[in-house]
């Protein structure tokens, strides 16, 4: 019975670690305080990056602010360049 309880706790991990590549900084930032159901918008807010100034990809697919990040996802934040 003890092992079954341990398995259910492992499956319902409430937090996990992801790596986020930020093009502007040319570096990987580890975020280890990411609860389940964290959205792209949540990550941008945590890193202090404006949604309107970036494009985010998850596993090389363009993501929206409402997309949920899962454990082991490859997240990249690319800068949007505009001007006249």
Image (cartoon, rainbow, N blue to C red):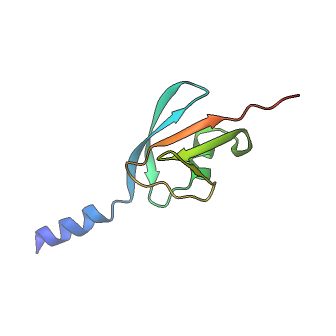
Q: 78 or 42, which lies in front? A: 78
Which corner quadrant holds the N terminus? bottom left
Which corner quadrant holds the C terminus? top right
Residue at horizontal 64%, vertical 42%?
55
Residue 76: give x, y in percent of width and height. Answer: 53, 39
* 74 relative to 67 in the view: left or right: left
Q: 2 or 62, which lies in front? A: 62
Q: 33 or 82, which lies in front? A: 82
Residue at horizontal 26%, vertical 65%?
9
Kindly indicate the quadrant of the structure image that contains residue 64. Answer: bottom right
Residue 47: give x, y in percent of width and height. Answer: 59, 38
Residue farthest along the bottom direction in this orientation: 1
Q: 17 or 2, which lies in front? A: 17
Residue 49: give x, y in percent of width and height. Answer: 66, 38
Residue farthest along the right direction in this orientation: 84
Kindly indicate the quadrant of the structure image that contains residue 15. Answer: bottom left
Kindly indicate the quadrant of the structure image that contains residue 66. Answer: bottom right
* 45 relative to 80 in the view: left or right: left
Residue farthest along the top direction in this orientation: 26
Residue at horizontal 16%, vertical 72%?
4
Residue at horizontal 69%, vertical 45%?
51
Placement of 27 over or under 69, stated as above or below: above
Placement of 59 over or under 23, stated as above or below: below
């Amino acid at each position: 019975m003890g092992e079954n309880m341990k398995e259910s706790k492992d499956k319902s991990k409430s937090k996990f670690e992801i790596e986020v590549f930020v093009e502007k900084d040319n570096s990987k930032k580890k975020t280890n305080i990411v609860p389940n159901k964290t959205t792209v918008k949540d990550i941008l807010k945590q890193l202090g990056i404006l949604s309107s100034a970036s494009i985010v990809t998850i596993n090389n697919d363009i993501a929206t602010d409402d997309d949920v990040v899962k454990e082991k996802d490859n997240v990249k934040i690319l800068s949007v360049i505009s001007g006249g």
